[in-house]
Structure formats: C-alpha cells, structure tokens
Image (spheres, rainbow, N blue to C red):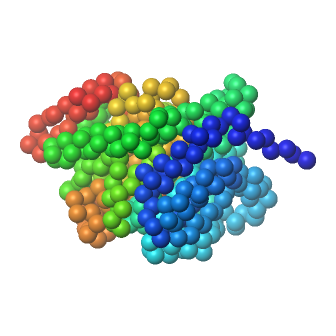
C-alpha cells in the first residue's frame, strides 16, 4: 500500500491560511450570496479547505470544487483508445459557463507537475488539448471577456516542487516552493491585504502613464530580438486590480507584477527570442525563436519542444498571432528570487512577455460595451489558446512609438525608464 506523505509539516499553516484569505478578499473580493467554482489538483486539498472556509465566511452562496489528479490523467494516455484524444467533457464546461452566466466567481489553483505529459505522444497531447480548448470555450469566454471576478493562486504540489528543486529531498523541496509561493503572493508579510493595496496602487501608476502616452506600438530590442508590436486601436493598459463587467474589482492573478494590453493582431513585425523556457502541457519549450510578418508567425524554432510548439501554432488561425503584450521589470521579486518555476503564473511575472492567441476584451477603452466584431475590427485577436512566453531580460530595451514616429524610452536594460 502506498503511503501518501503529509507535507503540512513543511508548509507554514498560518501563511497558507493568509493565502486563502487573500485569494478570497483580494483576488476575488467575493460578494455575499455569490457562488464560487474552484478547480484544483487533488494535492491542493489543504488549500481548498481553507478557501472554502473563507468563502463561506465572506458569505458565499455555494462553493463547488472540481479536482484533477495526475495519476488519472496519465492513465488516459496509457490505456485509452485513440478516439479518446479527440473528446472532452463538454457537459462539464457547459455547466461552468452556465454558472458564470448566473453570476458565479471562478478560482483556479495552479500546481500540477509541469512535466507530467513530457513522456507522452506529442500528437495525442495536442489533440487532447485542442478538444479541451474547444469544449472549454464557452466558459473561457466568460473569463477572457472579464464577465466575472476570477482568480488564480498556487499550491506547492510535491511533483511540481521536485521539478523546481530537483537536488534536495522532496519534503525540503515542498517547503522551499511553499516559501517562494508565499513570498511572491505577499502573504509572508505582516499585513498582506494592505501590502496588496499598495502594490495595486503602484501598478495603477504604470498603467495610467502608458494610457496617457497612447503609443501606437512598442519596439523591443535585445539579443536575438528586434520586434515591433503594434497596439490595438483604442487599447487600454491594465495592471493589478481590475473591475469585471459584473462590477466587482478583483486581482485575477496572485502573484502579479505586470501591466498589460492588447496588441494589434495584424501589426507585429520582426523577430524575437524567448528569455526563459515555456512549460506547456507537460513539455518544456526552450530557446523559442519566431519571426512575424503582418502580425503572423511565419517561422518558429526551439532548441527543445519544437514539435509541440508548432502543433500549438497550428491550433487555429489566431494561434500564430498575439493576444497580449505585458511589461514587467527585471527587478521584480519573482525575477530576483532566481527561481525558474516552470509555471507561467510565476515565470511571466519575472519578465516582459507576449501571449499567443486570445486577447482580453477588457484591454480596450469601453471594452465592456464592444461586440466581438468591433474588437476584431480594432485589432483584437481570437483563438482557442492563450499562452504567455517570456521575452524580457536585463539586456532588453523597449521604446514606445508614437503615431508621428517619435520614440519615448519605456524600459532600459529591463527596468522602467
């Protein structure tokens, strides 16, 4: 019989409690009577229990949790028929979409083993991902269009911890990852809710300045990078706390260090190289190099995971175009930690990044009132995917380009200019 180790002895219970409280009070700002849908790895049960407790303290209507498990996921790849990989649980995602349409909030706990599917057939992984993305679209649209308040936090799953800290015993790795999560999420501070208020204020200052400049494009230069990212017509910068269409101001990502907006899907030109590996669906994609013409990726290479990268790019027409550009200083706390998390929620907050695929409708002036056709006409991209990868470092400069051709320094050597 397999004995499952209890890692609660190395995960600080007080800080875990603070994380749950921050997720509900800052991340979601859950309202009285509001339902909550949670998705989580089975290993994150201790955090789910605390989140559920604090949700009900905040007055939640009903909390419903859906768990995933690595062993059962892998069982599909070992035993399922070939036809299984073109199917997904449409009924589940239809139910989630209905819950969100009825006003439920959404909270996701991140923490799966980033290399879970690394030994599986990339073709099957790609097929399963595409089927899942198509089934998830009704629910994802409610999230991407910011119809609801939503939040993502993380839990130090042992399999994830082993990837981040491979040279220490598993319990030590879990403890180190827990401490890193707590620090990045600001719950290692005496007053984390006040700390988040101050941090949101600083991010607001950055986004307000960028919105005042009304740049038509950003120009990135650095080793292996000479990229001009046109910005969507009527784009709007956001960062930290944002107000959803349901009127609730929430922090979707904990942690977050970025300010971000929508690129113009047809106006990206040049070449760019990744500065950190991308962990995607169990595959590590490293040293990405792509070339854009007319907003579309026409060449793509990677030293590792190239086959998976190209399958991602073939998901649909929008997968080769950008849906987000985000600015993060190289001196961010996550960057200074020196840890590669193999988890986009953390790694994207260590570096400036771009995202393939779906744009956020909230990143437009009056975005809540725009139709999908209007968003497309203004340059917003549409896709089944939204995948962030990192292009910033202490060797990358960024200039803002005005419509008259003049330049304004935005970042120098990875820091705000």
| Outermost residue to the left | 404
Identity of the residue drawn at 59% across and 40% down: 14
User: In this orientation, which residue lies closer to the viewer: 216 or 99?
Assistant: 99
- On screen, residue 23 versus residue 322, left or right, reads right
User: In this orientation, which residue lies closer to the viewer: 403 or 52?
Assistant: 52
| Outermost residue to the right | 1
Q: Is residue 124 above or below residue 211?
A: below
Point out residue 403 in the picture as x, y percentages from the top left corner: 12, 45
- On screen, residue 13 versus residue 246, left or right, reads right
Point out residue 352 in the picture as x, y percentages from the top left corner: 37, 37
User: In this orientation, which residue lies closer to the viewer: 381 or 192?
Assistant: 192
Q: Quadrant of the C terminus?
A: top left
Identity of the residue drawn at 53% across and 45% down: 19
Query: Looking at the image, how many numbered discs can be counted on the residues?
Result: 0
Would residue 316 be visible to someone looking at this image? no
Point out residue 297 in the picture as x, y percentages from the top left corner: 39, 47
Point out residue 156 in the picture as x, y percentages from the top left corner: 63, 41
Identity of the residue drawn at 80% across and 44% down: 4
Q: Is residue 149 above or below residue 263?
A: below
User: Quadrant location of residue 95?
Assistant: bottom right
Would residue 401 be visible to someone looking at this image? yes
User: In this orientation, which residue lies closer to the viewer: 55 or 386?
Assistant: 55
User: Quadrant location of residue 215?
Assistant: top left
Identity of the residue drawn at 33% across and 54% down: 242
């Amino acid at each position: 019989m397999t004995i499952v180790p209890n890692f609660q002895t190395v995960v600080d219970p007080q800080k875990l409690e603070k994380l749950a409280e921050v997720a509900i009070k800052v991340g979601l700002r859950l309202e009285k009577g509001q339902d909550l849908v949670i998705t989580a790895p089975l290993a994150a049960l201790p955090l789910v229990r605390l989140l559920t407790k604090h949700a009900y303290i905040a007055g939640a209507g009903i909390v419903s949790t859906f768990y995933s498990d690595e062993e059962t996921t892998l069982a599909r790849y070992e035993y399922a028929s070939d036809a299984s990989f073109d199917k997904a649980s449409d009924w589940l995602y239809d139910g989630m979409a209905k819950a969100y349409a009825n006003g439920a909030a959404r909270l996701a706990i991140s923490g799966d083993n980033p290399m879970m599917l690394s030994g599986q057939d990339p073709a099957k992984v790609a097929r399963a991902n595409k089927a899942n993305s198509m089934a998830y679209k009704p629910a994802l649209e409610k999230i991407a269009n910011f119809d609801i308040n939503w939040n993502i936090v993380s839990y130090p799953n042992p399999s994830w911890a082993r990837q981040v800290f491979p040279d220490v015993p598993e319990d030590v790795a879990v403890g180190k990852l827990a401490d890193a999560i707590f620090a990045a999420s600001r719950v290692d501070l005496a007053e984390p809710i006040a700390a988040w208020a101050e941090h949101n204020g600083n991010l607001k200052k950055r986004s307000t300045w960028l919105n005042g400049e009304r740049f038509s494009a950003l120009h990135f230069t650095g080793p292996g990078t000479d990229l001009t990212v046109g910005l969507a017509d009527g784009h709007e910068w956001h960062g930290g706390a944002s107000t959803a269409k349901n009127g609730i101001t929430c922090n979707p990502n904990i942690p977050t260090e970025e300010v971000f907006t929508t690129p113009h899907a047809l106006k990206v030109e040049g070449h760019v190289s990744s500065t950190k590996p991308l962990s995607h669906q169990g595959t590590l994609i490293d040293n990405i190099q792509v070339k854009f013409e007319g907003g579309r990726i026409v060449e793509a290479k990677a030293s590792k995971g190239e086959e998976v990268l190209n399958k991602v790019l073939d998901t649909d027409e929008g997968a080769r175009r950008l849906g987000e550009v985000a600015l993060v200083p190289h001196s961010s706390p996550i960057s200074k930690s020196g840890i590669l998390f193999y988890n986009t929620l953390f790694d994207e907050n260590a570096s400036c990044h771009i995202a393939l695929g779906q744009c956020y409708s909230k990143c437009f002036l009056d975005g809540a009132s725009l139709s999908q056709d209007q968003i497309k006409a203004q340059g917003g991209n549409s896709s089944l995917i939204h995948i962030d990868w990192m292009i910033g470092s202490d060797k990358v400069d960024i200039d803002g380009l005005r419509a008259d051709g003049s330049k304004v320094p935005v970042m120098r050597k990875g820091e705000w200019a």
